[in-house]
Amino acid sequence: MSAHGLSGPGLRLDRLPRRRRINHVMESLAWLAAAVAVAILGVVVWSIARKGSSELNLDLLTKPPIPFSLTNAPQGLSNAFAGTLVIVGLATAMALPVGILVAVYLNEFATPAIRTSVGLVLDVLAGVPAIVIGIFVFVLLVEGSGQSALKGAFALAILMLPFVARTTIEVLALVPNSLREASLGLGIPHWRTTLSIVLPRAVGGILTGTVLAVARVAGETAPLLFTSSLAGTQTSWNPTHALQTVPVAIFELSESADPKDHARAWAAGFILLLFILFAGLTARWLATRNARKVAGR
Amino acid sequence: MSAADVNAGPARRPFTGRRVRFGDVSLQVVAGAAALGATVLVGLIVWKLVDGSHLALSKFGLGFVTRVAWNPVIGHELYGAGSFIFGTVITSLFALLLAAPLAIGVALFLTELAPRTLRAPVTALVETLAAVPSVLLGLWGILVLGPALRTHVEPWLHSALGFIPLFGPPSTAGASIFTAIVVLAIMILPIVSSISRELFLGVPSELKEGALALGTTRWEMVRGVVFPYARGGVVAALILGLGRALGEAIAVTQVIGGGVFIHWSLFSGGDTLGSKIAESYQGASTNLQSSALIYLGLILLVLSLAANIAAQWIVRKVARKHGVTRGGHA
């Protein structure tokens, strides 16, 4: 390697053919890397879509699984879909208000020092592995008293919290200060300014962040293994019992030796992936629709 | 943290005379309690993991960290994290080695080389892969990737590079450390490449154009301007990817095969900290075993927090240097 970046002799014209050759090799390598990566990614996405869509049927959503079934009676994963709806719904209900309050405090009340240090805490919380969150909730709530969908939802809520708080902070920071000043100037108290002037302005962005957070935790398995996995096969909506969920069901079916179980795992996984991608697109649509509104133009 | 002395800048504070508004104080207290709660939560996680593992901590002490053993037979119980830490470090590092050049290549391709028509679809594909839940990637790993690696890639690597102990005899079941490495690499590739892409896009175009105007080739421009400018951020992205790989439990459990031994061949089974915990979810047979599992969780927490804090520290340092904050959280 004789090319020294931008310093001195690297740019010598008499070496130009050689420098061009190196450039050519490097550009080819980047093309190659992109081609390999795209090929791998394409194979993954394509094989999930192909296997999943070929196994799709309505029984999957409407019929419960039949344990130790030796017949070909149609079975599905209705219990898992119901459980995922309940647990993700409860987790959102727990994480959303707390996350918004954290963001309101940091953006509207806290001193810069507190803002930085709590921001660091949020980053640390976001970096805790999901399986560790599961173990934590197990030690805190499950050990001794048993699993339940509520405890599973609490574990997912811990994963959602830093995400919701972070995105809300970013949206609140976009609300123009002149709006706050105008409101305060009219004699409206700080708390009413925050609740009825600032937050309504940020609602669209908060919604976007929430949809993204839901998409992220809907596919989480690890926090639920120790908090809501030892569940029955009948479809239930009762959050005080352990409920089966789609990711945990896929995890269990993937370890089975029966190809029929694999088929259901692919189909359920495909539905899960479609939901996550759809949520991502919705969030993007909401974001572009709201970007102009928040800035007040 | 009393409500009165923690207050907004004077510009935002309404003139209230001497009256303290009840609404202001209560919103501040409620919101402050939420922020305090989030902070306490992190401490509570650490404390509960230490508390839950005290049985194993007091019986095995720090020797647990290096011991290679996992014997749950009552009366002969002996546990250690050695092989799991080895498995975690080996899988994560090799996954990073596989993913890093590809991810940076993709990012360079997308920012410097790709024709406009290719940019959007490739970016969308990378983002789609980032959205695939780990359990689904594990399902693909165990049913599609594992068998393919066992029949095609492992025998080939063994015959060509078998003199290196890493490439031992091919696995029998298709579930091996090697499969776990490939799955983890696929998992961190979109993270590292999308952060790197943003960093490369953030390089001021004056600098790039200036270099090209001096007569550099495109590669010399990338080496002389883009890489030095984005270096810190890319390192942080790599560490974030490493942290993600360290903490991944589900997909690894599905494809790694299991086993308590330190083995140099990548084609044998093994376990990571996360996978050992995850595969025991149906219950431990004794209190000591469940305490040892929580101890594994504690070690995993320490490892991944170290990786994350290192990444945050680098991001903050780089942000101060460039006066921008980008690529902070994955």
Image: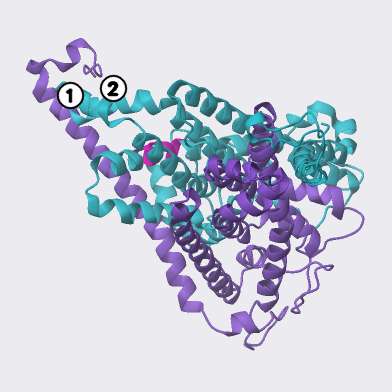
Chain colours: A purple, B cyan
Q: Is residue B98 magenta?
A: yes
Circle 2 packing at 10 Å, graded few (<14), some (14-19), many (20+), is many
Look at the image and give the residue range highlighted in magenta. Answer: B97-104
Position of A160 relative to B308 (above/below): below
Which numbered dot is residue A242? Answer: none
Distance between the alpha carbons at the discs numbered 1 and 2: 9 Å
Q: Is residue B186 magenta?
A: no
Q: Quadrant of the N terminus of chain B?
A: top right
- Which subunit holds the residue at mark 2? B
- Which subunit holds the residue at mark 1? B
Q: Amino acid at mark 1?
A: Thr
The spot of residue B281 in percent (x, y) is: 76, 55
Q: Amino acid at mark 2?
A: Gly
Residue to which mark 1 is pinned:
B216
The spot of residue B33 in percent (x, y) is: 80, 42
Is there any visible trace of residue B166 in the rendered image? no
Q: Tell me what residue is drawn at x 60 percent, y 50 percent.
A: B252
Q: Tell me what residue is drawn at x 41 percent, y 50 percent.
A: B153
The spot of residue A198 in percent (x, y) is: 61, 49
Residue to which mark 2 is pinned:
B224
Res. B37 image quadrant:
top right
Dot 1 and dot 2 residues touching (CB under 8 Å): yes
Position of B251 relative to A31 (above/below): below
Is there any visible trace of residue B323 in the rendered image? yes
Q: Nearer the viewer, residue B236 or B102?
A: B236
Look at the numbered disc 2 and give the secondary structure of its residue: helix
**A125 horizontally vs B151: left or right:** right
